[in-house]
Amino acid sequence: MSPELLSAPVAEAAKAPDRAHSRARAARRRKVLINVARALLLVGCLGLWEVLSRAKVIDPFNFSMPSQIWDQIYTWVTHGTALGSLGEQIWYTLYEALLGWVLGVVTGVVLGIALGRITLLADVLGPYIKVLNSIPRIVLAPIFVIWFGLGPASKVASAVVLVFFPVFFNAFQGAREVDRNLVSNARMLGASDRRVTLQVVIPSATSWIFTSLHVSFGFALIGAIVGEYIGATKGIGLLVAQSQGTFNAAGVYAAMVILAVVALLAEGLLTFAERRIFRWKPADSEH
Amino acid sequence: MSADTSPAIELWGASKTFRTPSGGLHTAVRDLDLTVGRGEFVAVVGPTGCGKSTTLTLVSGLEEPTEGEVLVAGEPVRGVGDKVGFVFQQDATFPWRTVLSNVMAGPRFRGVPKAEAKRKARDWLARVGLEAFEDRYPHQLSGGQRKRVALAATFVNDPEILLMDEPFSALDVQTRALMSDELLELWAGTHSSVVFVTHDLEESIALADKVVVMTAGPATVKEVFTIDLPRPRKVEAVRLEPRFIEIYREIWESLGEEVRITRERSAAHVA
């Protein structure tokens, strides 16, 4: 047999995996490119800020610069803040935000589902909820400080009012838009009204509710921070207020960076929980 | 007791009027008299949108008649009862429940202990050939498989009366014939009476003992035909028999007129 005849089928067989291989390599290369571009963009922006600030093109006292912000975070981490350790401040804010978030979500979901299921209740309370919703709720924060004092209670309260409404409206909408077929089917299979609510309405409203949970955790943090900013004894909001009071621009930025990290971690946890709960959903409808 | 000898379903002068969103009144069913005997398979055919489905919701207890009387096993219908099973036209499986949990839903809703509900559900899943799929979620199944889940979920409750609202209309032709055969097999193993709504005349003749032709909306009974084709039937084979074609022609003479009326009405509506 000639060598040509032997080598021909080998080349044929090698072709298909080769194409898959090169496609995978292209995909990997694209991923690397995106990550490098992202890093360059960040370094470029921060670098530009640093350079402009050092060259005094922009006022370094007012606008600060990344290296100073980093120094500030480093100082807070290693030596603590003027209010105590940094961990304590983060924990304080997180505690207020979480408590407010949980309370707001629970009341929002319960009331939303109840009003979605009981038309009479929705008709009676509907206009009042609309009125309450139209109030810019952040202005309630000073009132809460007057009512509940400088402790965590006033911050929890402002977090609750911010969280409640988006969660409530989504739960309400979710309960209203339940597939009528599913409800009819459950009733034909023998489900009581209570079971229809618990086993049909609530599961189908969960995707609506989860959408609002993402947004509302951010709102809870805002509520806690604004509350602390107005008057508190501890917390990142107070850190912002103090830094502002001493014209420490780097301090304000540093607090912002810390908050962003906290919010991103919370968001990651929420997405993880969502993946576990929505295993029954087709994968392509997940984001 | 009268309940033992009375027909499975009786409708006496039943009418149903809905209020339309624009404030008008829409009569879906008018002055309907219909009797379904015990263990009988009745198919209801009529032009699209004439009010066939409304007839089923009246029997199911999901809706009340505006006028007239609806009796199930000799008793007037007051709300959803436990004798009736309903297979819907659209997909009505619970997407967040696994296949097994979907089939268990009915018994669990009715207070059957978990272990027994699971045993019954597995039994029915085996009968519809889905025992290997019990851990899947509905979105992981094909349309035909989901319909089988819906059938198992309905049959597991052991209904005396089975209402089916164009259950196979969303399936492709081959799956449809297959499902029809399976339905006949499942039904043969029970003593339930069936009301099967469809707009497909062939399907109705192949399945039923009695075909009820409805008028163009508002629906009422126009004519009732007895189908004397022998059982057991195979849907694909029975279609080719001369007697089938004879019956088809006979019923189409009655149904075709109503279809024409509906078509002319909608044409006038568009114009």
Image (cartoon, rainbow, N blue to C red):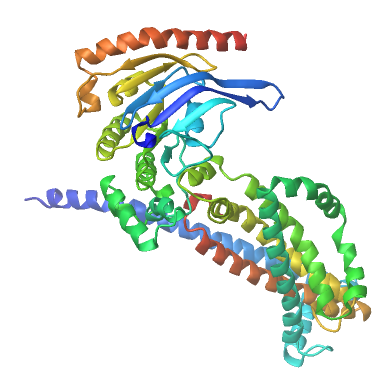
Residue B227 image offset from top left, x and y in percent:
28, 18
Camera-nearest residue between B88 and B111: B111
Residue situated furthest front in the rendering:
B1
Quarter occupied by residue A35: bottom right
Q: Is residue B161 above or below residue A68?
A: above
Q: Quadrant of the C terminus of chain A?
A: bottom right
Task: Give the residue drawn at x 77%, y 66%.
Answer: A160
Residue in the foreground of this view, choosing between B49 and A85: B49
Indicate left or right for A196 with B100 as reference: right
Q: Residue at x 73, y 56 (%)?
A: A166
One can see residue A64 in this view: no
Q: Vertical placement of A247 versus B5: above or below?
A: below
Q: Nearer the viewer, residue B23 or A30?
A: B23
Q: Is residue B165 left or right of residue A252?
A: left
Image position of B16 (left or right of A147) = left
Q: Residue at x 41, y 57 (%)?
A: A24
- Residue B262: x and y in percent read 51, 12
Q: How many marks?
A: 0
User: Where A109 falls versus A256 (above or below)?
Assistant: above
- Do we see residue B15 in this rendering? yes
Q: Is residue B8 left or right of residue A88?
A: left
Q: Position of residue A172 (x, y in %)?
A: 68, 51
In the current view of this chain or complex, which residue is farthest to the bottom?
A79
Q: Residue B193: x and y, percent?
A: 34, 33
